[in-house]
Image (tube, helix red, strand yellow):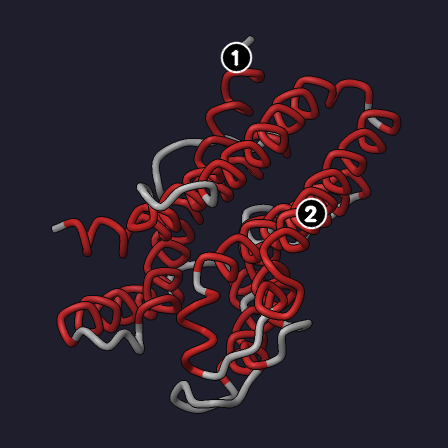
Amino acid sequence: MTRFFKMCWIGCCALAMVAATRLRAGLPVGAPCFLEGLIFCSTVFGYHFAHPDRRVRFVAWAMGGIAFLCFWEISFTARLLLVIPAVILGFYYGWKWPQNVGLRWKPDWKPPAVAIAWAWVTVLLPVEGVMNTGLWLIFCTRVLFISALALAYDLHDSAYDLKRGLETVANRIGAAQTLRLIDWLLAAAGTLELLRVVAQPEALWAAIALWINFLSSRWVIRRLFVGTELVEWRKTIIDALMVWQLVLLWAAWEW
């Protein structure tokens, strides 16, 4: 049961990022629709379709089938927008069943590829590509935030990746420098939010919530790598920082 909770949790985090975008863009955050169904199921599929456990693979491919059905129920514009993350996913895995190819085997490209795909799906899809300066700043902030989480993922997987011969930024520069790079990414995301407040003072409520999120994310990530008692739940907690961001945004919006 724990395995399947963790499996679906990443899809829930993707939906949290979609809801955060809707909230900040002034769009209704209501009951899930086909777009949310597509994003949830395709995220679960993308992260687990090649899992070594056959049961997990089966559920992942079932989710992929549901995502395919949802795809035909969303708008034509949203379908076109999905081309970019699909291409990124193809390059990430090297356009074949996961082997020693693709962007995930390129240490400098792996975190940005993951972050851009996430930002594209969770920012552009909810607004159907109708972007303005504020939304582009949100997009860039999302890229920086997800990049920081992706580096934390790599740091967690560093021993496993070394055994497989997979070079990552975390393996190349070490834990201390990786944590410092995460700090810089979160600081850059906070700076972009400051620029957005300068351009749109009414967005101060969101900026305060995100600054709290970035500072608390830095603290949580560093605490996770101090000891080993939370190793099994480390990735789940890292992902939870996305849900935490939505909670803070929602609280600030209500306030």
**Is 110 drawn above or below residue 194 in the view shown?**
below
Residue marked by disc 2: 180
Q: At x 80% / y 35%, what residue is drawn?
A: 191
Q: Position of residue 63 (x, y in %)?
A: 26, 65
Local secondary structure at mark 1? helix
Q: Position of residue 16 (x, y in %)?
A: 44, 40
How packed mark 2 is, by other alpha carbons closer than 10 Å (few <14, some 14-19, many 20 or more), is: few
Q: Position of residue 251 (x, y in %)?
A: 51, 16
Local secondary structure at mark 2? helix
In the rendered view of the protein, which quadrant contains the C terminus? top right
Query: Mark 1 against mark 2, which lies toward the viewer?
Result: 2
Looking at this view, is 150 or 90 the one in front?
Answer: 150
In the displayed structure image, the side of residue 66 where residue 132 appears, left or right = right
Upstream in the sequence, badge 1 or badge 2? 2
Kind of residue sitting beneath label 2:
Arg
Q: At x 33% / y 42%, what residue is drawn?
A: 230
Question: Which mark is on residue 78?
Answer: none
Q: Residue furthest top?
A: 255
Q: Residue furthest right?
A: 198
Using the numbered discs, state the Cα–Cα distance from disc 1 to disc 2 in whole angstroms. Answer: 34 Å
Q: Are marks 1 and 2 in contact (CB under 8 Å)?
A: no
Residue marked by disc 1: 254
Kind of residue sitting beneath label 1:
Glu
